[in-house]
Amino acid sequence: MGLTIRLLTSYCLVYMKSVRTSLDVATGVLFAPAFDATGMNENGELEILLTNDDGIGSVGIRALHDALSDVGNVTVVAPADDQSAVGRAISTEVEIEEHELGYAIRGTPSDCVVAGLEAIGPYPDLVVSGCNRGANLGQYVLGRSGTVSAAVEAAFFGVPSIAVSLYVPTGDLAFHEVEVTREDYGEAVRATEYLADHAIDAGVFDQADYLNVNAPIPGDDTVKMEVTRPSHVYDMDATHNGDSIRLHDRIWERMAETDIEDPEGTDRRAVVDGNVSVSPLTAPHTTEHHDSLEGLASEFSSIK
């Protein structure tokens, strides 16, 4: 059975948050579930909204769903198909379908977060996005990634969130040729379960809006968790080929060869070295006092 959810961009969302309504997909009827003052459900369980950008049928979201179900009550609201690299694209109306894991949305990861929080419910204590097949490392990918963008969307609602991705070494293969098994998500799942279980009570989200987690494929060595900052390294180029232009992210080639310039303390360095990277981040863009821009602004009105 398919239903449609209209995503609202008006102040009526404030009222919707206050009553925390949910949508019964079977009947199309809105209802208000039972919550205590902390946002946990009536059984005292942590409420977790799980989404991704690889699609609801992906291996990564299934692995996270099963592990996070040991931490709290998991509601899956995820794209019906692959929405990789769509950033924070948003729709005005999306179709919703029941799925064995939860709800499939014909839309983007940000659509899923807005729909999950404002129309489906239950209202979560934590939003988790992932696990993405492929790393999301460096400052330049934060605005591109659908996985990270879902966490950012939750942060604007004031809901703590975690984006989690798996670093997949490619070697000489193309990325789509690399086979990734459920077992390969082991360290990513372990890190996410640990953070979901402990980060809120530890006060992590008093200083961060969301966490960007990247994990390696399990190996023989002990994996550490490193608190990192997103790398500034950027290496995009473009080649004009007749009627088309090919855009090329050379960072991936350098990672495959472990030839990276990223210093200690950065997300990419941690993952390439075989550890879990956790970057505590804030969602709003920040502004600082800027003397030279203030000078230009003050002279603007005198220009004819």
Image (cartoon, rainbow, N blue to C red):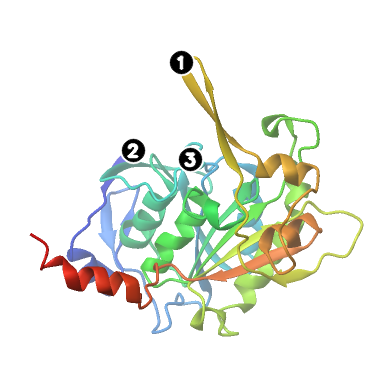
Secondary structure beneath dot 2 equals strand
Q: Nearer the viewer, residue 219 or 189?
A: 219
Residue 264, numbered circle: none
Residue 237 visible in the shown view: yes
Label 1–label 2 contact, CB within 8 A: no
Q: Which residue is denoted by mark 1 in the rendering?
A: 243
In the picture, measured across the screen, residue 57 lies left or right of residue 93, that is: right
**Picture quarter with the N terminus:** top left
* Circle 3: element type: loop
Please state the horizontal and vertical placement of residue 219, each as a whole percent of the image: 87, 54
Tell which residue pokes out farthest to the right in this image: 220
Q: CA distance from mark 3 to mark 1?
A: 27 Å
Task: Judge whether residue 123 can be spotted in this image.
Answer: no
Task: Point out the frontmost of discs 1 and 2.
Answer: 1
Dot 1: few (<14), some (14–19), or many (≥20) neighbours within 10 Å?
A: few
**Mark 2 belongs to which amino acid?**
Gly
* Mark sitting earlier along the chain (1/2): 2
Closest to the camera, between mark 2 and mark 3, is: 3
Rendered view: 258 above or below 212: above
Left or right: 120, with 303 as reference point: right
Q: Amino acid at mark 1?
A: Asp
> Quick check: 271 left or right of 3?
right
Name the residue tied to disc 2: 2
| Residue for point 76% across, 54% down | 216
Determine the image quadrant of residue 191.
bottom right
How much space separates mark 2 and mark 3, taking CA atoms?
20 Å
Can you identify the residue that label 3 sits on? 83
Q: Is residue 182 above or below residue 117?
A: above
